[in-house]
Each structure stands twice: as structure tokens, then as C-alpha cells.
Amino acid sequence: MAVKKGELVELVIDSTAFGGKGFTKIDGVAVFVEGAIPYDRVRAKILKKRKSHMEARAIEILAPSPFRQYPPCKYSGFCGGCKWQFLKYDQQLEYKRQHAIDALEHIGLIKGVTVHDTIPSDLVFGYRNKMEFSCSDRRWLPPDEWEKGNSDNDVALGLHVPGTFDKILDIDACLLQPELGNNLLRDVKQYIKNSAEPVYGLRSHSGFWRYVVIRNSASYEEWMVNIVTATEKKDEVQPLADMLKDAYPQVVSIVNNITSKKAGIAVGEYELLLHGRSFIKDTIGGFDFEISANSFFQTNTRGAKQLYATTLEYCSLSGGETVFDLYSGTGAIAIYLSQYAKEVIGIEIAESAIEDSRRNCQKNNVSNCRFILGDIRTCLSDTGKTADVLVIDPPRSGIHKDVVRQVIDMGAEKIVYVSCNPATMARDIGLMKEQYHVMEVQPVDMFPHTYHIEAVCRLEKKHSGC
Ligand SMILES: C[S@@+](CC[C@H](N)C(=O)[O-])C[C@H]1O[C@@H](n2cnc3c(N)ncnc32)[C@H](O)[C@@H]1O
């Protein structure tokens, strides 16, 4: 094959690959093309050449795919927040379904499963209830600014350039969050820029300001601002909180999380309350949830309703079952299922999420849920109960193989696997396929304009003779 790294080639894209890239072949070798979608004819630069495949980036669209649309965001193409804004929404839904099918077939080696049409998101913009913006002591300059000779390496508060840990694109507004979040973002940024304290360097690991996490409630006019800093300096952050509280009555919670850890995670070792209360409230399916800064809550509240409704349907509960909710977060699934089951036992590693779960049960008058704090890998047997139905909703990395083994040994009649990563879901389900029939999968779009997809999979225990 004559193509070399750095060479420009003309390509017609055949399909999509995981990660949202376009896929085609050159002389039988797979090429993954960033910034391209099926039926595009593009000029692309070969970035990496391996024996098995090549990676390329589209640098010019020679003939656009009929599935292209004009991306409304000025950062589209550079920002890692959403990479598919230029793809029509119906087509996004179709490709997401296809990813679920491909993952099951190629990773889980499971063929012939019914994968339903993707349930769309009610909102395709302004749907996110949580945005995490990173600070950096050097703003990443997009190519047009480089070309104009702009060397202003001012600080940044924004989102990562795709695939990088240290390149932050400075953002004034993100269309994935409601507009008020953008006003908050701009005001916080202005304050940080004027502050005497330095912005954190992602390579030097020194500096003060680290992240700004903005949360909002889809059901109540409530907002939270979580300012994450490297050290505790209340004199520096309290005036920011006072300014926000005076300007935005909708902001009912302002907290300061403090972390000395180098890891790029916006979670504090401890938290200071700067204004109001330490949580905001939201509603799913008629239940109220109190969500604190470090607790997991589905980021698309309206989408979560669809997700939980599918989970409930797949559990097909008659009222007498003991259900385990593994990786239970703030207890949202457990509470949603509670009125249809005898009891629900949640297991979760984050202490703040367990506290939220217990409080959420009280607030909603739910008395048949119990939550265990701990790592599922070591405390699955602490329940002292046998599960009729297991709901498993792990993080993107999926389930540890030791846990898969324990899950199989538990022998529940039904498993409902909820996943935000079809690849790890397919891997984990693949390990259960000797003991469980994989019945059906329902993709639910919680993340429009990204290639990410949530999926719910229904498994039923095999009995001898099946
Ligand atoms: C995708 S969230 C699921 C949350 C919940 N089911 C919901 O819908 O809101 C995954 C959760 O797993 C928790 N988690 C991650 N690793 C864990 C582990 N080893 N043991 C227990 N919980 C874990 C995280 O803290 C997070 O709350």
C-alpha cells in the first residue's frame, strides 16, 4: 500500500465507527476518519499508519453527505463536548443503534438480538443538567487563530479538545446546557481572570482554580455552581459566590470542592458550602431527587425518564420481587422501581450518593429500599438476600470480571443491564451468555450530537433444556 503518514488522500466514507469517526478502506485496509460521516467525499490527511488500520482527519469536504447539516455551535469541529453536530439527528439515532448492534456482534459475539429503534431525546440542545468546565493556564488556540498569528495564550475555562487531557478550548457558551448556564460560565470566568490566584496548569499541576461545574434542575428553577480549587482559600471564593448569589436568584447552591489530587477529576476531598444548600432538586417519574455536587445523576433528566421506564418494563415486576440495584448512584432507579417490587437493595461506592439515596427515599415516602455503601466487587454478598431481578448500571468501564462471576453465581432469573457504553456492555454480556439468554436491547438517546448512547438490555436465565 503506497499511502504514507502525512499524505493527503481523497476518500468516500462508507459507514461510521465507534468514537463517531467515518469509516472506509484503502486497498482493503481500514481507515478511521475524524470529522467525516457516511457519503462524504473528503480530502483527508493520514495521521497514523498501522499494519491493521490507518487514522485520518478530514481537512476538506469535497462533496458533502446528504446527512450533513449546518452545526449551530461555533466550536463544532474542535470541541470534545459534541462531535456530531454536523450530522442530522435522525441519522445520529440510526448510527447509535448500529453501534449497539455492532458491539453485540463483534465484541460480545452475540448475534440475532432484537435491537429496537433508538428512543430520541425530547430536547436536542439545552438538554444537559450538568456541565463540567476545566481551567487551564494556557488557552488552546484553534487553527484559524494560529493562522492569523494570534499567540495570545491567555487562561482558559472551557472543554477539552477531543482526545487530550491538557488542551482546553476556551468556551463562552455551550449549546448543550440551558442559556443561564452560559451566563454563569462567563461571569465565573471573568472573576477567575481578574483573581490574584493563578489558574491551574494541567502539566505543571500548580495553580488554584481547577474546575467549574454547573448543574441545573429540569423540573425546578434551581441551579448549582460547584467551584473546584486546588487548596482552601475561602477569602478568594466567597466573594465569587456572593456575586453569583446576588446576580442569579435561581442559584440555590454554591459549593467549593477542594482537591489536592493531580487526577483530572472534578471531585473534592472535601466540600465547603458557600451559599444556600448543598444540593439541588430534580424530578423523574413523579419522584423528587436531591442531588449533591459529587453524586451521580443522569445528565439528561427527560431522557432518564425514558431510560427508567424501559428498565421498569424489562424488569416486568409483579410486586413480590427482591430487586438489586447495582451501582445505584443517588438511588434513582431503586426509587423508580420501588412501588412495583417487594424491596430494592442498592449498592454504591460514593458516600455522598448513598446519603442522597437515603434522603431521597425519605422525601418520597419510600420505605422498601435499602442502600449499602461499598465496592460491589467486595460487598455483593453483604446483602444477605437472594435477588429475583438484578439491575446493573455500571460506569463507562463496565463491570469488573470478578463481579460478572459473582453476578452469574447469584443466579437471578432476570438481569436488566443499563449501560452508557455499548462496548463494555457487550463484553460483560458476552461473559454471561452461557447462563443467560440475551432477549432484547433498547437504545435511548441521552446525549444528542455526541456519538454516545445509553442502552438497556434484557437477559433471562437459561434453564436446562433451553
Ligand atoms: C452510571 S452511574 C449509575 C447511577 C444510577 N443507576 C442512576 O441511574 O442514577 C454508576 C454509579 O456507579 C458507582 N460506582 C462506580 N464504581 C463502583 C463500584 N466499584 N462499586 C459500587 N459503585 C460503583 C458510581 O459512583 C456511580 O454512582
Image (tube, helix red, strand yellow):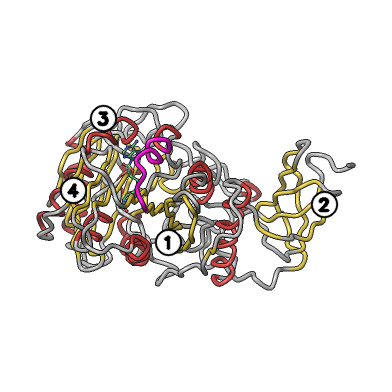
Which residue corresponds to the image point at 42% horizontal and 40% vertical from the top-left?
Answer: 399
- Main secondary structure along the magenta-highlighted residues: helix
Can you give x and y, in whole percent of width and height, for residue 108 in the image?
57, 47
Ligand 1, by image quadrant, is top left
From where the camera sits, is residue 168 visible? Answer: no
In this rendering, the answer to whether 25 lies above or below 440 is above
- SS for callout 4: helix
**Label 2 amino acid?**
Val
Bin the neighbour count of mark 2 within 10 Å (Cα to Cα): few under 14, some 14-19, many 20 and up. some
Identify the residue under disc 1. Answer: 446
Q: Which residues are magenta?
A: 404-413
Identify the residue under disc 2. Answer: 9
Which residue corresponds to the image point at 27% horizontal and 59% vertical from the top-left?
Answer: 216
**Label 4 amino acid?**
Asp
Bin the neighbour count of mark 4 within 10 Å (Cα to Cα): few under 14, some 14-19, many 20 and up. many
Can you give x and y, in whole percent of width and height, for residue 36 in the image?
68, 58
Instruction: From the viewer's perspective, tell me whether residue 20 is left or right of residue 402.
Output: right
- Looking at the image, which residue sits at the far front? 465
What is the C-alpha distance between the residues marked 2 and 4?
A: 54 Å
What is the C-alpha distance between the residues marked 1 and 4?
A: 23 Å
Identify the residue under disc 3. Answer: 231
Give the quarter of the image for residue 174.
Answer: bottom left
Could you say which disc has been placed on residue 88 in the image?
A: none
The verdict on residue 405 being magenta is yes
Instruction: Please tell me which of labels 2 and 4 falls first in the chain.
Output: 2
Identify the residue under disc 4. Answer: 356
User: Between 347 and 205, which is closer to the camera in this rendering?
Assistant: 347
Mark 1 Cβ inside 8 Å of ligand 1: no
Instruction: Please tell me which of labels 3 and 1 falls first in the chain.
Output: 3
Can you give x and y, in whole percent of width and height, for residue 445 in the image?
46, 63
The verdict on residue 124 being magenta is no
